[in-house]
Amino acid sequence: MAHPAVKDAVVAGIPDDIDGEIPTAFVVRCPSQFHVTSQELIRFVRERVADEERLRGGVYFVDAIPRNDGGKPLRRHLIRDVLHKSQVNRTG
Protein backbone atom coordinates (compact mmCIF):
# COMPACT_ATOMS: atom_id res chain seq x y z
CA MET A 1 0.00 0.00 0.00
CA ALA A 2 3.00 2.33 0.40
CA HIS A 3 3.68 2.47 -3.36
CA PRO A 4 2.11 5.55 -4.98
CA ALA A 5 0.60 3.49 -7.82
CA VAL A 6 -1.32 1.20 -5.45
CA LYS A 7 -4.90 2.11 -4.57
CA ASP A 8 -5.65 -1.11 -2.64
CA ALA A 9 -3.84 -4.37 -2.04
CA VAL A 10 -3.88 -7.58 -0.09
CA VAL A 11 -1.29 -10.34 0.27
CA ALA A 12 -2.36 -13.97 0.53
CA GLY A 13 -0.59 -17.30 0.49
CA ILE A 14 -1.22 -19.40 -2.58
CA PRO A 15 -0.45 -23.13 -2.68
CA ASP A 16 3.07 -24.13 -3.69
CA ASP A 17 4.40 -27.66 -4.15
CA ILE A 18 7.72 -26.90 -2.43
CA ASP A 19 6.95 -24.33 0.29
CA GLY A 20 3.31 -25.13 1.00
CA GLU A 21 2.25 -21.52 0.43
CA ILE A 22 3.97 -18.50 -1.06
CA PRO A 23 3.11 -14.80 -0.60
CA THR A 24 1.20 -13.33 -3.52
CA ALA A 25 -0.08 -9.78 -3.92
CA PHE A 26 -3.43 -8.78 -5.37
CA VAL A 27 -3.27 -5.12 -6.35
CA VAL A 28 -5.73 -2.48 -7.48
CA ARG A 29 -3.82 0.23 -9.31
CA CYS A 30 -4.56 3.92 -8.94
CA PRO A 31 -6.46 5.07 -12.04
CA SER A 32 -3.63 7.34 -13.17
CA GLN A 33 -0.92 4.71 -12.56
CA PHE A 34 -1.76 1.86 -14.94
CA HIS A 35 1.84 1.85 -16.21
CA VAL A 36 3.21 0.25 -12.99
CA THR A 37 4.42 -3.31 -13.58
CA SER A 38 4.37 -6.37 -11.37
CA GLN A 39 8.18 -6.44 -11.46
CA GLU A 40 8.34 -2.87 -10.18
CA LEU A 41 6.08 -3.74 -7.24
CA ILE A 42 7.99 -6.96 -6.48
CA ARG A 43 11.23 -4.97 -6.40
CA PHE A 44 9.62 -2.29 -4.19
CA VAL A 45 8.44 -4.90 -1.68
CA ARG A 46 11.74 -6.85 -1.78
CA GLU A 47 13.59 -3.76 -0.54
CA ARG A 48 11.29 -3.42 2.48
CA VAL A 49 10.46 -6.89 3.86
CA ALA A 50 12.13 -10.02 5.18
CA ASP A 51 13.01 -12.79 2.73
CA GLU A 52 10.08 -15.02 3.71
CA GLU A 53 7.66 -12.14 3.05
CA ARG A 54 8.82 -11.45 -0.51
CA LEU A 55 6.22 -11.83 -3.23
CA ARG A 56 7.44 -15.16 -4.59
CA GLY A 57 3.93 -15.86 -5.90
CA GLY A 58 3.98 -12.69 -7.95
CA VAL A 59 1.56 -9.81 -8.34
CA TYR A 60 -1.91 -10.04 -9.83
CA PHE A 61 -3.68 -6.86 -10.87
CA VAL A 62 -7.39 -6.93 -10.07
CA ASP A 63 -10.24 -4.46 -10.50
CA ALA A 64 -11.26 -4.64 -6.83
CA ILE A 65 -10.47 -6.47 -3.63
CA PRO A 66 -13.58 -8.37 -2.49
CA ARG A 67 -14.41 -7.65 1.15
CA ASN A 68 -16.96 -8.87 3.66
CA ASP A 69 -19.45 -6.54 5.36
CA GLY A 70 -16.86 -5.71 8.01
CA GLY A 71 -14.30 -4.66 5.40
CA LYS A 72 -12.04 -7.70 5.79
CA PRO A 73 -10.50 -8.88 2.48
CA LEU A 74 -11.88 -12.15 1.12
CA ARG A 75 -8.53 -13.77 0.32
CA ARG A 76 -10.08 -17.14 -0.56
CA HIS A 77 -12.05 -15.54 -3.38
CA LEU A 78 -8.91 -13.96 -4.83
CA ILE A 79 -6.91 -17.18 -4.53
CA ARG A 80 -9.71 -19.22 -6.10
CA ASP A 81 -9.91 -16.83 -9.05
CA VAL A 82 -6.14 -16.92 -9.61
CA LEU A 83 -5.98 -20.70 -9.41
CA HIS A 84 -8.92 -20.98 -11.80
CA LYS A 85 -7.23 -18.67 -14.31
CA SER A 86 -4.00 -20.66 -13.99
CA GLN A 87 -5.85 -23.90 -14.70
CA VAL A 88 -7.53 -22.33 -17.75
CA ASN A 89 -4.21 -21.01 -19.05
CA ARG A 90 -2.51 -24.40 -18.64
CA THR A 91 -5.21 -26.36 -20.40
CA GLY A 92 -6.35 -23.71 -22.87
Image: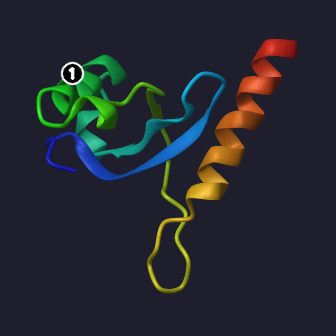
In this picture the colour scheme is rainbow
Residue at the extreme bottom: 70
List the residue tagged with mark 1.
43
Q: Residue at x 72, y 25 (%)?
A: 86
Q: Secondary structure at mark 1?
A: helix
For residue 58, above or below residue 11: above
For residue 71, above or below residue 50: below
Left or right, 12 with reference to 50:
right
Q: Residue at x 80, y 25 (%)?
A: 87
Q: Residue at x 63, y 46 (%)?
A: 79
Q: Amino acid at mark 1?
A: Arg
Residue situated in front as seen by the camera: 35 or 12: 12
Residue situated in front as seen by the camera: 27 or 51: 51
Point out the image quarter for the C terminus: top right
Residue 58 can be seen in this image: yes
Left or right, 31 with reference to 14:
left
For residue 80, above or below residue 82: below
Residue 64 at x, y percent in the picture: 49, 55
